[in-house]
Image (cartoon, rainbow, N blue to C red):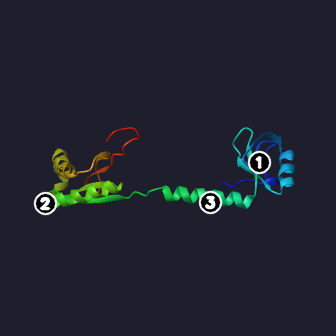
Amino acid sequence: MRERINNQIRAKELRVIDSENKNLGVLSIKDALELAQREGLDLIEISPNGNPPVAKVMNFGKYQYEVSKKLKKAKAGAKSTETKSVQVKIGTGDHDLELKAKNASKWLKEGHRIKIELFLAGRTKYMEEKFLRERLDRVMHLITEDYKVSDSYKRGPKGLFITIEKVVARAGQAK
């Protein structure tokens, strides 16, 4: 979205905020432009969807700088999460399952989603669904972190899989 400045603003009336963030009330576009020119600043339409639209009297370069600073701060605060994958087969031994569960617990602690796949090859693809789910549950019982199932059991091209993610504690709730 591009902000409209000075003569690009189309509204007849604007709610104007001055350079010290004081609300000057609703002014006609002509009065608002004169006010901005008197102060040697620009009239910037901040909220075009308001009724009436909101405009601010300030230096356009400074406004762009503040907006880019806010965007950078928001981007820095956003944490990216990956979907990590743990693959097991029907005959995977207990020790290997423990290692995979340990990795999964570590990834959950870091906040990643985890896709636990039961790789099925050959005749194992046609085994009973209940048996296959029990095989997947063996790994899930070994995971030490609290988790919730975000995507229940599904069949994929390689076999059966389930996706889990960390339980996020809400503010005010005891863990």
Q: Secondary structure at mark 3?
A: helix
Residue drawn at (39%, 41%) of the image? 170
- The residue closer to the viewer here, 164 or 128, is 164
Separation of marks 3 and 2 at Cα, in angstroms: 51 Å
Q: Secondary structure at mark 1?
A: loop
Which residue position is annotated with label 1? 18
Q: Is residue 55 visible?
A: yes
Q: As drawn, is 59 to the left or to the right of 163?
A: right
Separation of marks 3 and 1 at Cα, in angstroms: 21 Å
Q: Does residue 104 sit above or below 22 in this rendering?
A: below
Residue drawn at (44%, 56%) of the image? 79
Q: Tell me the amino acid under the disc marked 2.
A: His
Residue 125 in the image, given as x and y percentages of width and height: 20, 54
Split into 4 quadrants, where in the image is the C terminus? top left
Which label sits on residue 95? 2
Of the image marks 3 and 2, the number of the one nearer the N terminus: 3
Which residue position is annotated with label 3? 68
Residue drawn at (87%, 53%) of the image? 38
